[in-house]
Image (cartoon, rainbow, N blue to C red):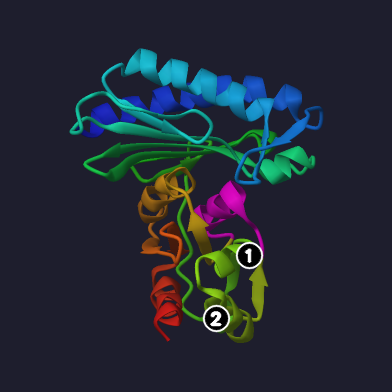
Amino acid sequence: MDSADLKKAAEIASRACDQARAEILPRFRDVAVEFKADGTPVTEADRAAERVIREILQEAYPDFGLLGEEYGEESSGDPGQPKWIIDPIDGTISFSRGIPLFGTLIALMEDEKPVVGIIDLPALDERYVSWSGGGCSRNGQPIRASRAERLDRALISVGDPICFEWAGCRPVLDRLQSTVPLVRGYTDAFGHAMVLTGALDAMVDCDLNPWDAAATQLMAVEAGGACVTRRGARGRLDLIFGSPALVEQIVEFFDA
């Protein structure tokens, strides 16, 4: 896909986010919570949002594959075709508790690499959009990741401590907390978006599923930052992303 094709795909994915908002926001702070077999929460807003996203993307790109958190994978039948990856509500715990720091994630993969990425934060009315070579924007305005170089002056975000445990990376969290004065837990899509703007200098997020990671893997780089992906103890993804200089230093914590 060329740049014009990718821009069009980003526009269609953005339209899917509009429809997802229409399902999510009326249910915010007014929805029942269930628990899936793995113990993670889910709501009707998650399911309804994924259904409308799938409908729009499949109508526009019927030959593409699709993987969503709630309804699984639908193959195009051609392994060489691009594939959409969807997380209708990233941060369902926040959503289900009435905390507005949740988002919708959509990525388009081509040759197993993300080429379009969207982070939509419905309750904050913020949408972050990237495609390969197109930079990164928030509500249509260009944004850039931090250029910070010193960990002792940085604001670093981390995912939940239990995810470091599951990924076999608890020593990394301990070292971060003993090295960096400001380590805070801005998790999920909200934390990822704040790294894109440079509000956070870097983030370490462990034990992620593909739909948690795909958009950020592209968007962090398009925002002028760096993103390193590792495999954790359970085979899931660990992301270190943000300021290139800080990412380089934090990666060394994994190898210590």
> Tag count in the figure?
2
Where is residue 202 drawn, in percent x and y? 51, 66
Residue nearest the observer in this picture, 42 or 234 = 234
Location of residue 58 by image quarter: top left
Per the image, the residue denoted by label 2 is 171
* Residue 249 picture quarter: bottom left
Q: Which mark is residue 162?
A: 1
Q: Quick one: 54 or 136, which is closer to the camera?
A: 54
Residue 82 falls left or right of residue 207: left
Q: Residue at x 70, y 26 (%)?
A: 25
Q: Residues within 10 Å of mark 2 (few under 14, many from 20)?
A: some
Residue 54 x/y as whole percent = 45, 21
Q: Circle 1: is it few (<14), some (14-19), or many (20+) Cα within 10 Å?
A: few
> In this rendering, does residue 133 appear at all?
no
- Kindly identify the amino acid type of the residue bearing the numbered disc 2: Pro
Q: Secondary structure at mark 1?
A: helix
In this orientation, does residue 79 appear?
yes
Q: Is residue 192 magenta?
A: yes
Tell me the amino acid under the disc marked 1.
Ile
Classified by dominant secondary structure, the portion drawn in magenta counts as helix
Residue in the picture at 75% in, 34% down: 33
Q: Secondary structure at mark 2?
A: helix
Point 61% across, 41% down: residue = 37
Indicate which disc residue 138 carries.
Answer: none
Taking the image as shown, residue 53 lies to the left or right of residue 24, namely left
The percent coordinates of residue 188 (x first, y second) are 59, 51
Part of the protein shown in magenta: 185-199
**Location of residue 95 in the rendering, given as x and y in whole percent from the top left corner:** 72, 39
Queried whether the magenta region covers residue 213, the answer comes back as no
Relative side of 113 to 183, left or right: left
Q: Which image quarter is the N terminus in?
A: top left
